[in-house]
Image: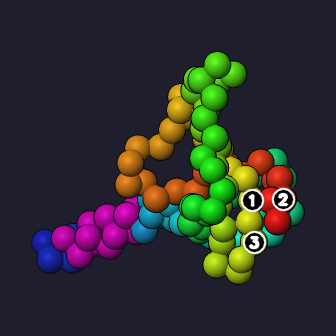
Amino acid sequence: MKKLQIVILVAIAISIAVLISFMTDLTTYETIASARQKSGKTVTIIAHLDNSQPIEYNPAKDPNFVSFHISDTLGNKAKAGIPFREALRPGEGRAYHTEGEDVG
C-alpha cells in the first residue's frame, strides 16, 4: 500500500471513532408532559424558571436541597428541585429532575 492510502485509512478510522464517541452524547429533549410519562427515567427538559412562584430553600429541613417551579414552551408547569450534592456545574445547560407535581 502507498503511504497516502495508509494515511487515508487512519483518517477514516479516527473519524469513525470520533463519530461513535459523539453518539453517546446525543440527547432528546422532552416537554414536561412527556417527561411525566417516563417516570423513573432520566430526561432532559427545556424549560425556564417560573418567576411567579417562589424558590424554596429550607436549611432547617435539608440544607442541600432547593426547589423551584419551571415552565416549558408549551405552557406546562412543574415543581423541580436539585440537591446541591448532585448539582451540575454552571453552564452545563441541563434540566433538573422534576418531581412530577402539577402546579397548575
Q: Would you say 97 lies left or right of 36 here? A: left
Label 1 CA crowd tier, 10 Å (few <14, some 14–19, many 20+): many
How far apart marks 2 and 3 lie (CA) works out to: 9 Å
Disc 2 on helix, strand or loop?
strand
Percent from the top left, x then y, of residue 47? 60, 67
Q: Which secondary structure class fits the magenta region best?
A: helix
Disc 1 on helix, strand or loop?
strand
Percent from the top left, x then y, of residue 4? 14, 77
Percent from the top left, x then y, of residue 30? 69, 69
Q: Which residue is mark 1?
A: 78
Q: Would you say 87 lies left or right of 66 here? A: left
Q: Which residues are magenta?
A: 7-18
Q: Earlier in the sequence, mark 2 or mark 3?
A: 3
Q: Which residue is mark 2?
A: 102
Percent from the top left, x then y, of residue 39? 84, 53
Does residue 21 belong to the magenta stretch? no
Do the residues bearing badges 1 and 3 touch, measured as CB atoms within 8 Å?
yes
* Amino acid at pointer 2: Asp
Q: Is residue 86 above or below residue 46?
A: above
Q: Nearer the viewer, residue 73 or 21?
A: 73
Q: Which mark is residue 76?
A: 3
* Amino acid at pointer 3: Asn
Q: Is residue 37 visible?
A: yes
What residue lies at 13% left-to-right and 72% top-to-bottom?
Answer: 3
* Amino acid at pointer 1: Ala
Q: Earlier in the sequence, mark 2 or mark 1?
A: 1
Q: Would you say 20 lies left or right of 35 here? A: left
Which of the 4 image quarters holds residue 60? top right
Q: Which colour assignment does the render follow?
A: rainbow
Label 2 CA crowd tier, 10 Å (few <14, some 14–19, many 20+): few
How far apart marks 2 and 1 lie (CA) works out to: 5 Å
